[in-house]
Structure formats: structure tokens, C-alpha cells
């Protein structure tokens, strides 16, 4: 019997990596034959055009540099994800970079892999920032065709 698929959405934030570590501890701490899921980690790389936006004249000149930087960030995210998984003895993992807006990319990854669960972190934005930027976790909770688990990093109590 084939295992269900778990997709973990990952960006370069600490909260995102906290969600990955939490997931590995809670779902992948046993031996591989007892893992409840096949693990797929997806990083959404924005397009250079969306990252630059409508910057006016000369914007086209910077697009190759922005694209190079976005590729470097994606490579760093996947390398750190691989190291995090290896440190937890999780070696059977699929790592992917998909280009586009994170909200759409994660929902597409769920469809592509027929995932039964999507795990995302929570950035902890305030109401204004969330209204301007939009919440990836909120969007996925409403649009992904699977269970969505939002892992929140606990607040440090003083």
C-alpha cells in the first residue's frame, strides 16, 4: 500500500524551518517503514518580474541579477532543508522548487502530489501587514484540497 503524501511549504524564514523541524519530530521520528507519510518539501521561488514589480525604466536591466539571487536563495533553502532532514535521519524526501506565488505554488503541489496534508509555518504578521501581503497559510487553508496544518512557533515567555 502506498503511503499518503505530506507536502511541507518552506521559505527562508525561521518560522518556516521551525515548522519543518516540528513536522520531522512529530511524524518522522520512527523508523522509515513506520512513517505515516511520504515527505515532499516545496519552496516557492517568486519570478524575477514579480520580485521587481513595475519599477519603471531600467527594470529589465536588473531582472537577470534578481533571477540569479532568487535561484541562490532557493538553493540555500533546499540545502538547509536537506541538512535539517539528514540531521533527523530523514533521507527519503523529495525537494522541489516551483516558480510562482507561494499561495498558488503550494496548492498546485498538493494537487500534483495528491497530498493528503499540507504543512505551512506561520509568519506571525500583524493585521495590517497580513492585509497588505496576504497570508499564505490562510489562503492555503481555504483553497488547498487537503488538510492544512499551520505550525506556529511558540512565543517566548519572559
Image (spheres, rainbow, N blue to C red):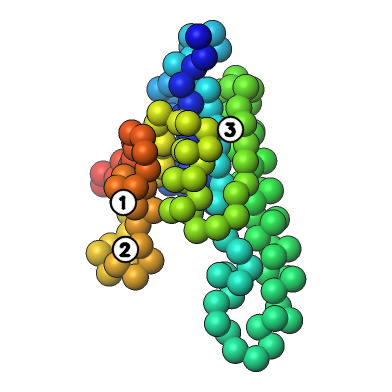
Marks 2 and 1, how far apart at CA: 10 Å
- From what the image shows, is residue 153 above or below residue 130? above
Q: Which residue is mark 2?
A: 130
Asked if the residue at tag 1 contacts the one at tag 2, i.e. Cβ–Cβ closer than 8 Å, the answer is yes
The percent coordinates of residue 148 (x first, y second) are 34, 37
- Judge the density around disc 3: few (<14), some (14-19), many (≥20) Cα neighbours within 10 Å: some
Q: Front-most of 118 and 91?
A: 118
Q: Which mark is residue 138?
A: 1
Residue 132, picture quadrant: bottom left
Residue 128 coordinates in the image, percent (x, y): 27, 69
Question: Dot 1, crowdedness within 10 Å: few (<14), some or many (≥20)?
Answer: some
Q: Residue furthest bottom?
A: 57
Residue 140: image x %, image y %? Answer: 36, 47
Whole-Å distance between the Cαs marked 3 and 2? Answer: 28 Å
Residue 139 lies left or right of residue 34; in this view the side is: left
Closer to the N terminus: mark 3 or mark 2?
Answer: 3
* Element type where label 3 sits in the image: helix
Q: Which mark is on residue 58?
A: none
Amino acid at each position: 500500500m502506498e503511503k499518503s503524501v505530506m507536502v511541507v511549504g518552506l521559505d527562508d524564514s525561521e518560522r518556516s524551518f521551525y515548522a519543518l523541524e516540528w513536522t520531522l519530530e512529530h511524524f518522522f521520528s520512527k523508523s522509515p517503514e513506520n512513517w505515516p507519510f511520504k515527505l515532499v518539501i516545496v519552496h516557492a521561488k517568486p519570478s524575477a518580474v514579480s520580485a521587481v514589480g513595475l519599477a519603471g525604466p531600467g527594470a529589465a536591466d536588473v531582472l537577470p541579477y534578481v533571477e540569479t539571487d532568487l535561484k541562490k536563495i532557493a538553493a540555500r533553502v533546499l540545502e538547509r532543508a536537506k541538512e535539517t532532514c539528514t540531521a533527523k535521519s530523514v533521507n527519503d524526501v523529495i525537494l522541489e522548487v516551483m516558480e510562482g506565488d507561494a499561495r498558488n505554488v503550494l496548492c498546485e503541489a498538493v494537487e500534483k502530489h495528491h497530498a493528503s496534508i499540507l504543512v505551512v509555518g506561520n509568519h506571525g504578521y500583524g493585521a495590517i501587514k497580513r492585509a497588505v501581503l496576504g497570508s499564505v497559510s490562510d489562503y492555503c487553508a481555504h483553497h488547498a484540497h487537503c488538510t492544512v496544518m499551520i505550525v506556529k512557533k511558540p512565543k517566548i515567555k519572559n
